[in-house]
Image (cartoon, helix red, strand yellow):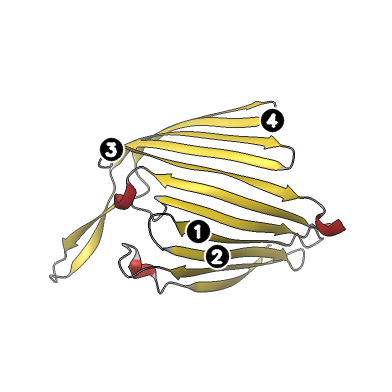
């Protein structure tokens, strides 16, 4: 049985939320084990956790400022993780209908190199383009750079409505990881995906 609650409130131009979750973690801990065939594998273990979260977002003119934080216990040593950043939007860029957003974020995980995700001390920079056309075309291009080593990855996400019932989505990732990076096994996981969705 999982238990969760969330409280949201808006004050002037600031939105914030408090949340708490008690139950089975959706993010397993991977431990190195030997299977019946004597092959070493990473086996997932789902612990019971307590997680408290805080989210805040403020709109100051053309600038959006956001902050997110969690504190989790029950999954090894208790830890906290944060994401903070901003987005500035140039509306009607170059006297057109387009909006161009410049984004920057800092992602931090108190667990450091023992974090189960690669975002333990990283920065993200990117740009978002919204054409504001009848097809609702938008694209996001960015780079995530690890501040602890030379690991990085580039990504692109975009979508466009082709008809009233068909939408096209594109997503891609390119990884650049040093040989000693703990996530080096994903260095060949570059991909580009094109999806067509039909809505009934």
Mark before the other along the chain sequence, 3 or 1 = 3
| Residue assigned mark 3 | 74
Across and down, in percent, residue 85 comes to 56, 44
In screen coordinates, is 47 left or right of 151?
left
Relative height, residue 163 to residue 70 (above, below): below
Query: Are the residues tagged 4 and 2 within 8 Å (C-beta)?
Result: no
Residue located 38% across and 55% down the image:
148
Cα–Cα span, label 2 and label 1: 8 Å
Furthest toward the top, the residue is: 11
| Residue assigned mark 4 | 13
Mark before the other along the chain sequence, 3 or 2 = 3
Mark before the other along the chain sequence, 4 or 2 = 4
Query: Are the residues tagged 1 and 4 within 8 Å (C-beta)?
Result: no
- Mark 1 is surrounded, within 10 Å at the Cα level, by few (under 14), some (14 to 19) or many (20 or more) other residues, namely many
Q: Is residue 28 visible?
A: no
Q: In front: mark 3 or mark 2?
A: 2
- Mark 4 is surrounded, within 10 Å at the Cα level, by few (under 14), some (14 to 19) or many (20 or more) other residues, namely few
Q: In front: mark 2 or mark 1?
A: 1
In screen coordinates, is 63 left or right of 194?
right
Identify the disc placed on residue 114: none
Identify the disc placed on residue 155: 2
Q: Is residue 182 visible?
A: yes
Mark before the other along the chain sequence, 4 or 3 = 4
Mark before the other along the chain sequence, 2 or 1 = 1
Cα–Cα span, label 4 and label 2: 31 Å
Query: Are the residues tagged 2 and 1 within 8 Å (C-beta)?
Result: yes
Across and down, in percent, residue 174 comes to 49, 70
Q: Quadrant of residue 155?
A: bottom right
């Amino acid at each position: 049985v999982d238990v969760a609650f969330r409280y949201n409130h808006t004050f002037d131009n600031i939105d914030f939320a408090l949340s708490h979750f008690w139950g089975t973690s959706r993010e397993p801990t991977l431990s190195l084990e030997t299977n019946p065939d004597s092959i070493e594998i990473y086996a997932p273990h789902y612990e019971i956790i307590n997680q408290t979260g805080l989210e805040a977002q403020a709109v100051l003119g053309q600038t959006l400022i956001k902050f997110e934080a969690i504190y989790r216990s029950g999954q090894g040593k208790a830890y906290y993780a944060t994401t903070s950043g901003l987005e500035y939007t140039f509306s009607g860029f170059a006297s057109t209908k387009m909006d161009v957003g410049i984004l920057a974020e800092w992602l931090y995980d108190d667990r450091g190199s023992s974090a189960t995700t690669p975002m333990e001390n990283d920065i993200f920079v990117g740009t978002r383009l919204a054409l504001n056309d009848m097809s609702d075309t938008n694209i996001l291009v960015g780079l995530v750079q690890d501040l602890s080593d030379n690991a990085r990855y580039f990504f692109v996400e975009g979508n466009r409505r082709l008809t009233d019932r068909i939408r096209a989505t594109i997503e891609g990732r390119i990884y650049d990881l040093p040989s000693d990076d703990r996530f080096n096994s994903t260095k060949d996981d570059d991909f580009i995906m094109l999806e067509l969705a039909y809505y009934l």
